[in-house]
Amino acid sequence: MAKTKSVKETAQSAIPQSATSILTVRNTAKKVFYFGAIAFVLAIPFFGKVYGAKLSALYLLGNNGKISGRTGGDVYMSNGRKRGFVIPAVVRNAYTAGVRGIFSSFSSMWGTLSTFEQLGWLNFNTTKMDRFKNTVTIKGKAAFIQLNANARNVGAMGSINNAPVGAVTPSAIILQAPLIKITGSVFDLNYTPDANALSVLISATVGFGTGVFRPSASAYRNISVQDLTSAGPINIWTDYVAKFGTPVVGSRIFISVKSTDMYTGLTSATTQEFSTVLS
């Protein structure tokens, strides 16, 4: 006697042998989804690098091939060098405290200016160098702070409340390579005298290796203010040692000078030079 098929067996026998059950299809879809998700997660670092490279290329294209700032795990500097990214420590010393103090003081002082004085600064334009060494124009409160800070750095007291409209910008100092001799405690700075160079701000760096040709702007520290109207050279050994200590023989020291009008805060273009410390 033939066995009677159940309803379930009858339904399954109606499905062609080549067909795949809905349960198998669902399991396959889950496997594809899970493996796809895992592959995507593993590929994120690779895509991140590719995406970062594309952004870097666009950034370079938009800034004439110059790059500065963090990209991925590297930090690019305007002098062409790069270093690995680390979280910087908050630097607190006499120099940074002085810079912050000057900025904070004149920033607060902006609010004490009259409407007429503020309008004068808003209509006044001056320039500064950005991180790419490009000249950018600033005005208003930013110009007020910068020019007052310039004047304060060369010993001016009080504040410059009125924008120096029509004032003459000081000329750049013609600087010759300094010769540094440790044994004689001499750090001669040679220059061409300038009848208008009453307040020249001299900045210097700590000694670098001979492979360094262009340190970053943050490496410079103000060491002295000199009157370069008379013939040189001048010996800035005491000023340098007071800031950095005795220089090491064979190291390379960079010097930066600019003339400043303490009554207007206007400065000349910066002149830079370097020399190797001799024994």
Image: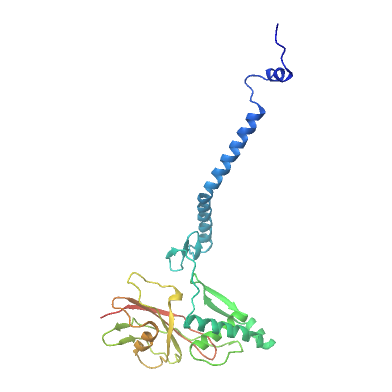
Color theme of the render: rainbow
Residue 153 in the figure: left or right of residue 178: right
Residue 233 in the figure: left or right of residue 105: left
The N terminus sits in image quarter: top right
Q: How many marks?
A: 0
Q: Nearer the viewer, residue 277 or 40?
A: 40
Q: Judge whether 19 appears above or below 179 on screen.
A: above
Residue 10 in the figure: left or right of residue 142: right
The C terminus sits in image quarter: bottom left
Spot occupied by residue 13 in the image (x, y as percentages of width and height): 68, 17
Q: Quadrant of residue 253?
A: bottom left
Spot occupied by residue 123 in the image (x, y as percentages of width and height): 64, 82
Q: Which residue in the rendered view is the most extreme toward the front?
A: 1
Q: Residue at x 49, y 78 (%)?
A: 92
Q: Which residue in the rendered view is the most extreme toward the right?
A: 7
Q: Quadrant of residue 125?
A: bottom right
Spot occupied by residue 139 in the image (x, y as percentages of width and height): 60, 79
Q: Judge whether 242 appears above or below 58 on screen.
A: below
Q: Nearer the viewer, residue 148 or 40?
A: 40
Q: Residue at x 38, y 78 (%)?
A: 206
Spot occupied by residue 32 in the image (x, y as percentages of width and height): 59, 37
Q: Nearer the viewer, residue 273 or 19?
A: 19
Q: Judge whether 34 appears above or below 12 on screen.
A: below
